[in-house]
Amino acid sequence: MDTLDTITGERLYLARIPDEEKYYKRYMELLNAKHVLTGTGNEPHTLEEVREVIAEWRKDEGNMTWGIFRKSDDTMIGDVCLRYGYEDYDNGGPEVAIMIGEAKSGYGSEAMKMLLDYVFEEKQKLFGKQISIINLGLYKENAGALRLYGKLGFEEVMERPNIDNGKVEIVMQMTRQMWNSLKNK
Ligand SMILES: CC(C)(COP(=O)(O)OP(=O)(O)OC[C@H]1O[C@@H](n2cnc3c(N)ncnc32)[C@H](O)[C@@H]1OP(=O)(O)O)[C@@H](O)C(=O)NCCC(=O)NCCS
């Protein structure tokens, strides 16, 4: 999707990644950080791939990808997205994914809370409708992501082997109702 709201929090803001070479380079650097490659199981990305993938997201009405920026110095430190079309979850909800280029910074939790507040705002409509559930998939061995999502209150609904590499994947979900009761605690 080409137009995105900017979402502002305490230390961070989520915003469209600018169409500038320096942001593509920075994004490549973040995607290729060691703990990110380990967590996602991805191969390193080239600059050309980064340009292409960002251009694809702009055209895709089922994809909302924000850069995560630190307020203090406007540095991009990661990304967070809501998307359809990668995995099928059979419940009408999009998938969420997050990446932070610095490990254990506390930014992952903050950015994900900002996104959940935004998605489940009372009158919010995304992808043309009110979202009542969001889904995610991660590798069981991805300790950082498992801790982050578990801590925020995502519920594990299924484990399954990945058909390509045999690693165990965990599927987690968060509903509007769950988030509303969790965030008020
Ligand atoms: C998962 C990820 C987003 C977490 O970001 P982060 O900024 O480190 O998150 P936080 O600092 O808010 O950490 C959240 C919790 O996880 C813990 N944690 C983070 N990384 C960890 C790791 N590698 N091993 C164990 N615990 C970890 C933190 O200590 C914290 O727990 P605590 O509050 O009890 O101390 C980041 O590591 C990342 O981008 N990983 C690669 C991409 C990825 O796997 N994305 C998720 C799949 S969609």
Image: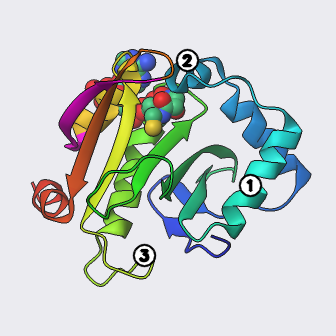
**Residue 158: quadrant of the picture:** top left
Q: Which residue is mark 1?
A: 54
On the image, the x and y values in percent for residue 65 come to: 58, 58
Q: Of the residues under marks 1 and 2, which one precedes in the sequence?
A: 2
Q: Residue at x 50, y 67 (%)?
A: 7
Q: In this rendering, does residue 105 appear at all?
A: no
Q: Nearer the viewer, residue 49 or 89?
A: 89
Amino acid, disc 2: Thr
Q: Nearer the viewer, residue 140 or 18?
A: 140
Q: Report how many numbered discs are placed on residues in the image.
A: 3
Look at the numbered disc 2 and say if its residue's Cβ is closer than 8 Å to ligand 1.
Answer: yes
Q: Which residue is mark 2?
A: 38
Which quadrant is the C terminus positioned in? bottom left
Q: CA distance from mark 3 to mark 1?
A: 20 Å
Q: In the rendered structure, does residue 70 fall within the stretch colored magenta?
A: no
Look at the numbered disc 1 and say if its residue's Cβ is closer than 8 Å to ligand 1.
Answer: no
On the image, the x and y values in percent for residue 132 come to: 24, 68
Q: Which mark is residue 126?
A: 3
Badge 3 local density, few (<14 within 10 Å), some, or many (20+)?
some
Q: Of the residues under marks 2 and 3, which one precedes in the sequence?
A: 2
Left or right of 26: which side holds 110? Answer: left
Span shown in magenta: 152-163
Contact between labelled residues 1 and 3, with CB atoms less than 8 Å apart: no
Q: Residue at x 31, y 56 (%)?
A: 134
Which quadrant is the N terminus positioned in? bottom right
